[in-house]
Amino acid sequence: MTTGSHSQVQLDNEHFRVTQWTIMPGGTIPMHVHEHEYVVVPLVTASMHVKNADGTSFEAALETGVSYSRPAGSEHEISNTASTEPIVFVEVEKL
């Protein structure tokens, strides 16, 4: 299945998993559940579409270098519906 997104694990040890994500224009990271608490570090300023497991959705504004965190158990799909450029961010999971 082509999703228009890809990831590259940069670090994976007993404490952290660090993954760089890229979502191409029109691309999606399919519905998934975060098993661990995590921090997102945007590498671009953009807006991404978030669809939650309960069917609600919203536009999440990303600002380069402005991090945010989410709890374990977060379940959602992420899409690049508004940008003509790739959305790139680093996700740091606390294992």
Image (cartoon, rainbow, N blue to C red):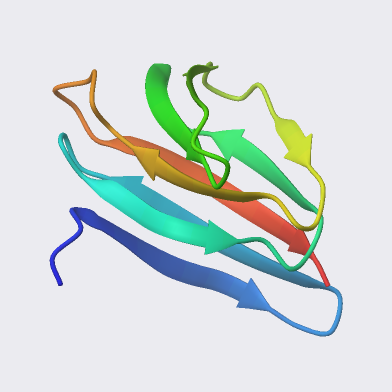
Q: Could you say which is closer to the camera, residue 15 or residue 1?
A: 1
Looking at the picture, does residue 68 appear above or below residue 21? above
Residue at 23% of width from left, 26% of height from top? 81
In this rendering, position of residue 48 left or right of residue 81: right
Residue at 13% of width from left, 65% of height from top? 2
Q: Position of residue 63 (x, y in %)?
A: 53, 16
Residue furthest to the front in view is 54
Quadrant assignment, res 27: top left
Quadrant assignment, res 35: bottom right
Looking at the picture, does residue 78 appear above or below residue 7? above
Residue at 81% of width from left, 55% of height from top? 37
Q: Position of residue 28 (x, y in %)?
A: 28, 48
Looking at the picture, does residue 84 appear above or below residue 71? above
Residue at 39% of width from left, 27% of height from top? 49
Q: What number of labels is visible?
A: 0
Quadrant assignment, res 30: bottom left
Assign the N terminus to one quadrant of the image: bottom left
Residue furthest to the bottom in view is 14
Assign the C terminus to one quadrant of the image: bottom right
Looking at the picture, does residue 84 appear above or below residue 41? above
In this rendering, position of residue 47 left or right of residue 18: left
Q: Position of residue 73 (x, y in %)?
A: 76, 57
Q: Position of residue 71 (x, y in %)?
A: 82, 47
In this rendering, position of residue 48 left or right of residue 52: left
